Image (cartoon, rainbow, N blue to C red):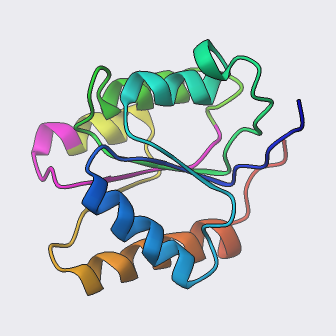
Amino acid sequence: MESKSVEILLVEDNPYEAELAIRGLKKHNFANNLHHIDDGADALDFIFGRGKYANSQADTPKLILLDIKLPRVDGIEILRQIKSHEKTKSIPVVVLTSSKENQDVKACYELGVNSYIVKPVDFDSFAKAVADLGMYWMLLNTAPPR
């Protein structure tokens, strides 16, 4: 099977918020190699190349935009697994969530999240925030060599 380049993995179960994020990234040409998953267990399978993704040959994402409240496996557990595995621990993970709960923020930073962003309520602010994330992590940030 042919290798598929995935630069951004968006893990978001709310279809409206996923669409807003994708539109914000597309507007600035960051969505060409984007993969969207709406379930925590599927996200782990994709990241680690197992289950239905065992033969996908997809590259490890360069950036993961991660919601916390997800079906089957929550974002904090996904973050824990990403940051504890040698293959994935250097991937930048940005939590993009509606949760302002102190315990969520604290847990994410203790696990090594690169950034924790509370989703803006209105469309324009949300789209701009996602586009700014794409700009910073895909163009300005220097990632460690793989």
Q: Please tell me whether residue 48 belongs to the stretch shown in magenta.
A: no
Above or below, comparing residue 6 to residue 128 in the picture: above
Question: Where does residue 76 sit, x and y in percent of width and height?
Answer: 32, 31
Q: Please tell me whether residue 98 belongs to the stretch shown in magenta.
A: yes
Outermost residue toward the top in this view: 51
Asked whether, in this view, residue 36 is left or right of residue 102, the answer is: right
Above or below, comparing residue 79 to residue 115 in the picture: above
> Can the viewer see residue 117 in this picture?
no
Question: Where does residue 135 sit, x and y in percent of width and height?
Answer: 58, 77
Asked whether, in this view, residue 129 is left or right of residue 87, the answer is: left
Above or below, comparing residue 33 to residue 10 in the picture: below
Residue at 70% x, 17% y: name it. Answer: 54
Residue at 59% x, 13% y: name it. Answer: 51
Residues rendered magenta in the picture: 90-104
> Can the viewer see residue 48 in this picture?
yes
Residue 124 sits in quarter: bottom left
Residue at 32% x, 22% y: name it. Answer: 73
Question: Where does residue 115 sit, x and y in percent of width and height?
Answer: 41, 56
Question: Where does residue 129 sit, x and y in percent of width and height?
Answer: 37, 76
